[in-house]
């Protein structure tokens, strides 16, 4: 699927479990969405809080033990990073948002979503979702790309899915 990383349209699906988020990610991948437009954010690192840094994609990806199937399954497709977000704790982010969150440093929170047309007053709602151990699956791109992704996420059984456009 042809996508662009400069467009600011986005869709955010909130999923109750890592299995549901993984199912949505698989559906996006099967539809041709790449790591340059898909990200997943969640708190699936509770068992081991001393992990910091990057896990490269491909054959060099690390093993994940107690971190669950979601993060292990995504390492072959999406870049994975960990960051401490104040008020939320350790968060794992896979995809293009991983480098944004880690690169922006502690305290940036989910403010990166504002650049994807998510209204600033809705950011706390997504922070609350992470605190409640839900998973965010985020896709950005041009309008047509995001519309198709929104339909895929909506069909994957999210708690809710929202579409944003500037």
Image (cartoon, rainbow, N blue to C red):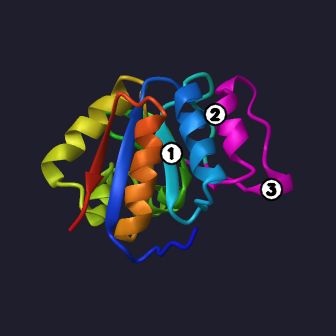
**How far apart in space, not on screen, are marks 1 and 3 (Cα)?**
17 Å
Circles 2, 1 touching at the beta carbon (< 8 Å): yes
Q: Earlier in the sequence, mark 2 or mark 1?
A: 1
Residue at x 53% of width, y 28% of height: 20
Q: Which residue is mark 1?
A: 40
Residue 150 placement, left or right of 128: right
Q: Earlier in the sequence, mark 1 or mark 3?
A: 1
Q: Which residue is mark 2?
A: 70
Secondary structure of the residue carrying numbered label 3: helix
Taking depth in this image into account, of 29 and 83 the one nearest to the observer is 29
Q: Position of residue 30 (x, y in %)?
A: 66, 51
Q: Earlier in the sequence, mark 2 or mark 3?
A: 3
Residue at x 35% of width, y 52% of height: 11
**How far apart in space, not on screen, are marks 2 and 1 (Cα)?**
10 Å
Q: Position of residue 59 (x, y in %)?
A: 86, 54
Residue 31 placement, left or right of 37: right
**Does any portion of residue 100 appear in the rendered image?**
yes
Residue at x 47% of width, y 75% of height: 4
Q: Quick one: quadrant of the C terminus?
A: bottom left
**How far apart in space, not on screen, are marks 2 and 3 (Cα)?**
15 Å
Secondary structure of the residue carrying numbered label 1: strand
The image's mark for residue 58 is 3
Residue 78 drawn in magenta: yes
The image's mark for residue 103 is none
Q: Position of residue 53 (x, y in %)?
A: 62, 51
Q: Which residues lie in the magenta part?
A: 53-81
- Total numbered labels: 3
Mark 2 closeness class: few <14, some 14–19, many ≥20 residues within 10 Å: many
Residue 58 placement, left or right of 82: right
């Amino acid at each position: 699927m042809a996508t662009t990383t400069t467009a600011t349209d986005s869709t955010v699906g909130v999923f109750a479990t890592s299995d549901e988020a993984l199912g949505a990610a698989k559906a996006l991948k099967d539809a041709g969405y790449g790591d340059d437009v898909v990200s997943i954010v969640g708190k699936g690192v509770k068992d081991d809080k001393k992990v910091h840094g990057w896990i490269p994609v491909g054959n060099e990806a690390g093993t994940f033990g107690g971190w669950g199937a979601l993060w292990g399954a995504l390492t072959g497709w999406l870049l994975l990073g960990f960051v401490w977000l104040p008020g939320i704790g350790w968060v794992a982010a896979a995809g293009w948002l991983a480098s944004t969150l880690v690169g922006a440093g502690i305290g940036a929170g989910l403010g990166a979503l504002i650049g994807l047309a998510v209204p600033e007053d809705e950011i706390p709602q997504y922070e609350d979702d992470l605190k409640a151990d839900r998973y965010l699956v985020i896709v950005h791109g041009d309008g047509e790309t995001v519309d198709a992704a929104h339909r895929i996420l909506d069909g994957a059984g999210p708690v809710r899915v929202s579409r944003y456009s500037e």
